[in-house]
């Protein structure tokens, strides 16, 4: 997928990127490659820019993990008009 994000015709955005299945190339971020291994609620992601992430699914919409020695909690909740990203 190739993108030139343009929100306004008079003031176009400067985002230029290419996103493939395992590769992302952008003007500002450079090149990064990603590979994810998934198991039974457990997974590992290797990224050339961000290192190794180990994660475990807690329940629908939430997971916890470690990336570069730092704890992460990633969650999403939506009910009616309320949407939250943690």
Image (cartoon, rainbow, N blue to C red):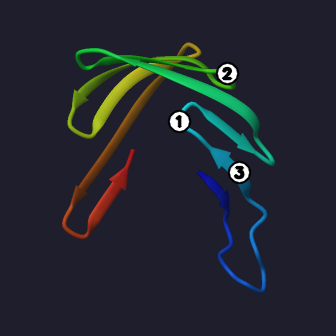
Quadrant of res 19? top right
Q: CA distance from mark 1 to mark 3?
A: 13 Å
The dot on residue 21 is 1
Locate residue 59, reporting x and y percent: 20, 32
Q: CA distance from mark 2 to mark 3?
A: 17 Å
Going 57% across and 26% down the picture, which residue do you hit? 34
Q: Nearer the viewer, residue 81 or 52?
A: 52
Q: Nearer the viewer, residue 33 or 71?
A: 33
Q: Are marks 2 and 3 in contact (CB under 8 Å)?
A: no
The dot on residue 67 is none
Q: Nearer the viewer, residue 82 or 17?
A: 17
Secondary structure found at label 3: strand
Label 1, residues with CA under 10 Å away: few <14, some 14-19, many ≥20: few
Q: Which comes sooner in the sequence, label 2 or label 3? A: 3
Q: Horizontal placement of 23 versus 86: left or right?
A: right
Quadrant of res 12? bottom right
Locate residue 66, reporting x and y percent: 47, 17
User: Which is more foreground, mark 1 or mark 3?
Assistant: 1
- The residue singled out by tag 3 in the image is 17
Going 32% across and 46% down the picture, which residue do you hit? 76
Locate residue 18, reporting x and y percent: 67, 47
**16 over 67 or under it: above or below:** below
Secondary structure found at label 2: loop
The dot on residue 48 is 2
Q: CA distance from mark 1 to mark 2?
A: 14 Å
Going 52% across and 21% down the picture, which residue do you hit? 35
Secondary structure found at label 1: loop
Q: Horizontal placement of 85 versus 4: left or right?
A: left
Q: Horizontal placement of 18 versus 14: left or right?
A: left
């Amino acid at each position: 997928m190739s993108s030139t994000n343009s929100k306004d015709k008079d003031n176009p955005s400067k985002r230029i990127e290419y996103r493939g299945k395992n590769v992302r190339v952008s003007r500002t971020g450079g090149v990064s490659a990603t590979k994810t291994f998934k198991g039974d609620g457990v997974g590992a992601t290797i990224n050339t820019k961000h290192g190794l992430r180990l994660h475990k699914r807690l329940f629908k919409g939430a997971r916890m993990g470690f990336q570069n020695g730092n704890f992460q909690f990633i969650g999403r909740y939506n009910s009616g008009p309320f949407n939250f990203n943690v």
